[in-house]
Amino acid sequence: VTVLGFVSTWDRAPDWKAALTALEPGLDFRIDPELGDARQIEAALVWKPRPGALATMPNLKVIVSLGAGVDSLRREEMPADVPVVRMIDPQLTRGMVEYVLYAVLRQHRYFPFFEDKQRASAWDQGGPVPDTARTTVGVMGIGVIGGAIARALREVGFAVRGWSRTPHAVEGIEGFHGADGLAPFLAECRHAVCVLPLTPATRGLIDARFLSLLPKGAHLINIGRGGHADEAAILAALDSGRLGHATLDVFHQEPLPAEHRFWRHPGVTLTPHVASLTLARTGAPHVIAAVRAVREGRRPDGLVDWARGY
Ligand SMILES: NC(=O)c1ccc[n+]([C@@H]2O[C@H](COP(=O)([O-])OP(=O)(O)OC[C@H]3O[C@@H](n4cnc5c(N)ncnc54)[C@H](OP(=O)(O)O)[C@@H]3O)[C@@H](O)[C@H]2O)c1
């Protein structure tokens, strides 16, 4: 019998209990702070864990993050030698794909322009329909989520390129990597999508220099983390017309303060960190697989490498 401790101040424990015990009926599911004898706990399912909670579990074998990113787990609180596995959930990935397809197509097909015209009862066909095959969309981070986004954009017919830390060969997607690959990657991006993990190497990446490397009038989509972007640089680039539009789901401070200029800027479309969420029903198989892999001495999918930060 696996004893699992649920340590999250955010997620709905009853949903996870139902989804996990449906797959493994013998599972002993305990919810923090009512963990019983914490020495019995082998697996912890966590998101923004209560400080000190994990330290009470000396026999922990694996920690599974309820989020795809592990930037909110305080590394110093992760017991040494206990593997940490990030969430991989097909529904989470699908949600991210939908969000980006919608954001790209909305700008690509000038919907904001037509929404304005409709408010003025104006029959205005605007400029010519853009050539999709000659419109380049760049995806920064082509891992589990970014890879699915890149393939979906390719299916729609865009010219797709990806940027990653290490080289990848994906059919029909032009690959760029590393710091040296960034400028040539950005040079053609009409739409640039950030779906990177937040690490020391990616923090603050979207700054004034980055924005100056995009084609004039480009569209930026940030669904990675707020820490990826210099918000003042985005506002300055929108004001100068260097950036045409920004679709933003993540911010330095969440909730975004009411006085922030993003709320009212005509060049910004914003959503309150909802690009995608993990569902217990679709995420549960990954949790069970991670626990089994560790128990059987195999490498679990989504194992975090703290040295690279994701
Ligand atoms: N807004 C939301 O609702 C939401 C929801 C889910 C996830 N997210 C964000 O999406 C992120 C990605 O998730 P994932 O599951 O796709 O992660 P993943 O599978 O680990 O993929 C990460 C990708 O980023 C690349 N990368 C990492 N560091 C880099 C660097 N310094 N320079 C260039 N590329 C770098 C990796 O390159 P390699 O391929 O070379 O390793 C990989 O392609 C999460 O960490 C989270 O921040 C946001």
Image (cartoon, rainbow, N blue to C red):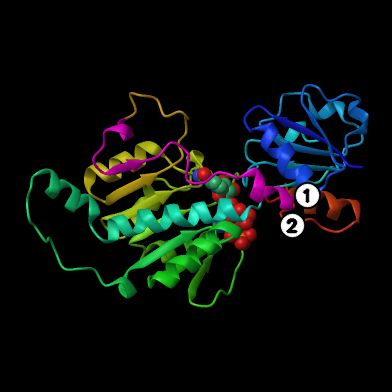
Is the residue 75 above or below the residue 217 in the image?
Answer: above
Which is nearer the eye, 154 or 6? Answer: 6
The image quarter in which residue 248 lies: top left
Q: Which residues are magenta?
A: 261-286
Q: Is residue 279 magenta?
A: yes
User: What residue is drawn where x is 26% and y is 37%?
Assistant: 265
Q: Which mark is residue 71?
A: none
Q: Earlier in the sequence, mark 2 or mark 1?
A: 1
Give the residue pinned by disc 2. Answer: 301
Quick one: SS at disc 1? helix
Image-based side of 183 in relation to 128, left or right: right
The image quarter in which residue 217 lies: bottom left
Image-based side of 219 in relation to 239, left or right: right
**Residue 238 appears anywhere in the view:** yes
**Residue 214 appears anywhere in the view:** no
x%, y% of residue 220?
37, 52
Image-based side of 227 in relation to 55, left or right: left
Please name which of the two marks, 2 or 1, marks the residue nearer to the observer.
Answer: 1
Q: Is residue 305 magenta?
A: no
Which is nearer the eye, 272 or 90? Answer: 90
Quick one: SS at disc 2? loop
Is the residue 83 above or below the residue 172 in the image?
Answer: above
Type of amino acid under label 2: Asp
x%, y% of residue 255?
45, 28
Type of amino acid under label 1: Leu
x%, y% of residue 219?
32, 54
x%, y% of residue 93?
56, 55
Give the residue pinned by disc 1. Answer: 23
User: What residue is drawn where x is 64% and y is 32%?
Assistant: 12
Mark 1 closeness class: few <14, some 14–19, many ≥20 residues within 10 Å: few
